[in-house]
Amino acid sequence: MAGARAAAATASAGSSASSGNPPPQEPGLGELLEEFSRTQYRAKDGSGTGGSKVERIEKRCLELFGRDYCFSVIPNTNGDICGHYPRHIVFLEYESSEKEKDTFESTVQVSKLQDLIHRSKMARCRGRFVCPVILFKGKHICRSATLAGWGELYGRSGYNYFFSGGADDAWADVEDVTEEDCALRSGDTHLFDKVRGYDIKLLRYLSVKYICDLMVENKKVKFGMNVTSSEKVDKAQRYADFTLLSIPYPGCEFFKEYKDRDYMAEGLIFNWKQDYVDAPLSIPDFLTHSLNIDWSQYQCWDLVQQTQNYLKLLLSLVNSDDDSGLLVHCISGWDRTPLFISLLRLSLWADGLIHTSLKPAEILYLTVAYDWFLFGHMLVDRLSKGEEIFFFCFNFLKHITSEEFSALKTQRRKSLPARDGGFTLEDICMLRRKDRGSTTSLGSDFSLVMENSPGATGIGPSRSADSGSLEEEPLILSTECPLEPATTLRGPLAFPPGAGGSQVFQLLILKPF
């Protein structure tokens, strides 16, 4: 399927229509969240139990990408490349309009990209290689896990010698030998250089210059052994030609405290004095001058301030005048990484810079499905432990509605063109009741309150008659209880006009418990 264009994603629907049969109804957010809350996505299970639902979600993502981009698909059938990456990995080549095609014609050969992926996948934890997921101004925004340590690297290379792919991640938590033992037992001291060399070639092939590491540690340690490493502590300085940014951000365990505080991120500060926290914030000075942020105070920021400032930094990197791409990663690349990838996708979309034909409900579906579900976020496990980083991502949108989070240059800021159709969601999303969690989170029953729902008077999309821009009123995520007066809602019901594309972050305003 490599090299298939976006049109292939809708071929089956077109054949159904031509045969006289009505095309299947597009999968909705309710179906997606129901599947997401039931099981973790595994590429090898795509055609098994629940496979039809997963296939519908996968096809829906391809269709949504195809609205605005010409793309190829890197096949990951049965998880042959990575067990927790999508079975159909989308490589965005250029925007589908002829104007953008002339400007940003892809210079990457998909066959070469596939070869580098296969050669480099062992370099990173759980085989989660550098994967491009967003295309902005011809630049690739990528995600991955951190670098694999010696134990995992040699363990998986030995495992893969006897067995075929699909289970690389089984070795992710295995570390029973030291680095020195690995080198002595293997007799091949060059394997480490080889796989990281291919990882670097892949980064360069995607024109990635900036690597943002979200780990709070230099190396992940389990049972007294170094399980994973990081570019910032590579002793051989293999990644010296890249611009490395160490921006430590709390792991998913910290979001248990967020849940326990009734989902109040304001005033919640991470404990930077814990023994395992040894990675200081480190950003080259030339990248910080224009942001007007006192980075020396990062350990005093609460969760809202920290997330805001990191997002500003990432937006400034991708919006710079050079042609360099960006890699974002944490340890495994399925908690903190999708948080910032999702926020980047939503922020750039809100400014009308990417996915320009997608309506709010569609971009919301795409980021939940592709950035979270299909890249292996373990929502079931996180909900059971109360580590609700997924919920925080969308709750946080109310904190980034102002122009300071816009990637639009001031001198060329303009109103967003009105998108066709109103903001309507076909599904009333009801998750199964969990025996833990607050009713304000995805860990419990909730519904999407529509414009015509009881008590939702005045809530819904509206358009500016003067500018034609979309001025979204908030979509309220509420409990099963009757909707209380609007004044009890956490966050503003309406943001002031003139906030550019960022107004559309009124997608989700959360009703407090």
Image: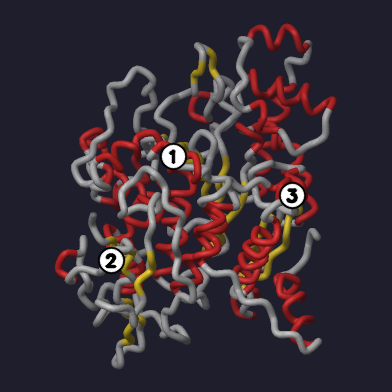
What is the C-alpha distance between the residues marked 2 and 3? 39 Å
Asked whether disc 2 touches disc 3, contact meaning CB atoms under 8 Å apart, the reply is no
- Residue at image position (31%, 48%) is 438
Q: Is residue 269 left or right of residue 470?
A: left
Confirm whether residue 13 shows in the render: yes
Earlier sequence position, callout 1 versus callout 3: 3
User: Which secondary structure lies at badge 3?
Assistant: loop
**Going by the picture, which residue comes out furthest to the right?**
162
Q: Amino acid at mark 2?
A: Glu
Q: In the image, is residue 34 above or below residue 326?
A: below
| Residue 2: x %, y % from top left | 79, 59
The residue that mark 1 highlights is 384
User: Which secondary structure lies at badge 1?
Assistant: helix
| Residue 373: x %, y % from top left | 56, 52
Front of the two marks 2 and 3 = 3
The residue that mark 3 highlights is 76
Q: In the image, is residue 283 above or below residue 500?
A: above
Q: Is residue 238 left or right of residue 454?
A: right
Earlier sequence position, callout 2 versus callout 3: 3
What is the C-alpha distance between the residues marked 2 and 1? 37 Å
The residue that mark 2 highlights is 403
Front of the two marks 2 and 1 = 1
Q: Is residue 399 left or right of residue 186?
A: left
- Residue at image position (51%, 51%) is 37
- Residue at image position (72%, 62%) is 72
Mark 3 crowdedness (10 Å alpha carbons): few <14, some 14-19, many ≥20: many
Asked whether 171 or 445 is in front, the reply is 445
Mark 2 crowdedness (10 Å alpha carbons): few <14, some 14-19, many ≥20: some
Earlier sequence position, callout 2 versus callout 1: 1
Confirm whether residue 325 shows in the render: no
Q: In the image, is residue 10 above or below residue 186?
A: below
Q: Amino acid at mark 1?
A: Ser
